[in-house]
Image: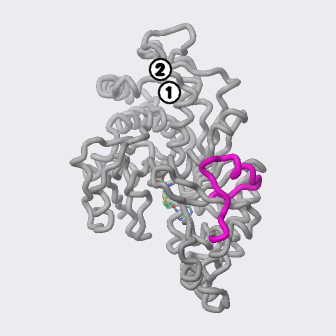
Amino acid sequence: MYELYPYFTNDGSVGLFSPQADDIYHSTYGALTEAYEKFVLPSNPDKYLDNKKEIKILDICFGIGYNTKSFLNYYFEKFVKKTKKENSKNAYNVAIDTDNNFNNSTTNKSCNSICNEKIYTDKFCPSIFIHALDNDKNLFFLSPFFKNLDNNKKNNKISFNQEKIAKMLSDKIEVKYKLNNNVNLSILKNIIKNNPEIFEDNEFQNLLTNPKYSDFFDKNMCLLFDYFKYNRYNNTHQINLKAFLHNIYYQHITWRYKRALEAPIFDKIKIKGEITDARLALKNSKYIYDIVFLDVFTPAKCPCLWTIDFLRLLYSHLDADGIVLTYSNSANIRNAFLQAGFEVGKIFNTSANKFMGTVAVKNKELIIKNNLLFELSDYDLGLINTKAGIVYRDSNLNLDNADIIKNHEADVKASSLMSSSRYIKTTRGKNEV
Ligand SMILES: C[S@@+](CC[C@H](N)C(=O)[O-])C[C@H]1O[C@@H](n2cnc3c(N)ncnc32)[C@H](O)[C@@H]1O
């Protein structure tokens, strides 16, 4: 049976653990903070948002979507300006259309339209296309339902046995980022439109309604899902149920959730979720991307998405001014990027005051002109030329992780390169990572 292992990370956002991968999906430090500081901010989103009509993002290993969510949050913060609550000439009316799920048709007059947002014109507000890849359907479907933030620290404990996580949960951090409800609404809107099979998916619905996980889900989003689920059926015997749910919906869903779904900005966001091996999805993809978030489990657990062959494929799907971001500092990952043709740099994390992660581009200027990104140092390049830099291989993009690891171990054993420990000893004091 499918199980979730959720807990609240130190910034109040929900994190997950995977017993199968024996790995965490998100940093215990803060799932949302990690997404902002390792992926979204170093990508220099303004460069794309200010200059392009459409931005194509590839979110490899979407999971429950923090990287996408953080990007969308940034987008909403940039383009949706708060105005006074009452209607104004420059603001648009927004409401949920209770008869036409997420259609562009005119809004139902029975809805109270609540208007407190104003939007820039098309000229300044680019469209966003997000290609979200993950092989776990449940996580993709559940993503818009996870609570954005829990300030209730009594929940900051875990209900499963994981010493390592439990220890790190005592640290408190400053909460710097908060997701707007519009983010989850826009993801739910896209899933309902593009993946209607969600309504028939019992496994997902059992997870969403399992009392064991109820602390982690946003009740308003769950009610909204119920509303849309029953609202789909347009036959007479459902009409009373529909009216009934309509009432529940209006009684229990706060005004924040009632607004905005019909707002023009929501039509600017398209999310295409593909539930499959990311290698297959990328092989079949016809898109060229501006920003790529590569958020795979560690190379030792999931090497299939860190191989030189997969990164070559990624290279062929990156725009000339595109950027790939990942949290890994490993010498062999940096080497694989270099050998795949990328210019490679590293990401400086201002909160941690150290380098955390790797960036790969075609245009080196993107590293040089970004104050969160740095070129690799002589020390980093030296480490790449040791055994630690030996890359993972998967020439037909179809090996399983165990075989990739076995082949990699054989490559390391057969190599005459210096060991990384010897390199580190001989260059002691020069280590900058
Ligand atoms: C570190 S987690 C990603 C966390 C995610 N970015 C988030 O915000 O929740 C790694 C993810 O990789 C997915 N995954 C593992 N192997 C994969 C593969 N071959 N293809 C696609 N997704 C994969 C897992 O299902 C998991 O969701």
Q: Which mark is residue 26?
A: none
Question: Left or right: 192 with respect to 151?
Answer: right
Residue 48: name its quadrant. Answer: top right
- Closest to the observer, 205 or 138: 138
Where is residue 163? Give x, y as percent. 28, 68
Where is residue 29? Give x, y as percent. 38, 55
> Does the magenta segment cover residue 287?
no
Identify the residue at horizontal 65%, vertical 55% (top origin): 324
Say above or below: 186 vs 262.
below
Identify the residue at horizontal 53%, vertical 31% (top origin): 76
* Residue 352 in view: yes
Q: Which mark is residue 261?
A: 1
Q: What's the image's color scheme?
A: one colour
Where is residue 366? Give x, y as percent. 71, 49
> Does the magenta segment cover residue 362?
yes
Mark 1 crowdedness (10 Å alpha carbons): few <14, some 14-19, many ≥20: many
- Closest to the observer, 233 or 400: 400
Q: CA distance from mark 2 to mark 1?
A: 6 Å
Q: Which mark is residue 95?
A: 2
Say above or below: 30 vs 433.
above
* Residue 392 in view: no
Residues rendered magenta in the picture: 359-379
User: Which type of secondary structure does the marked residue at label 2 adopt?
Assistant: loop
Mark 2 crowdedness (10 Å alpha carbons): few <14, some 14-19, many ≥20: many
- Asked whether the beta carbons under mark 2 and mark 1 sit within 8 Å of each other, the answer is yes
Amino acid type at image mark 1: Leu
- Closest to the observer, 276 or 332: 332
Residue 345: name its quadrant. Answer: bottom right
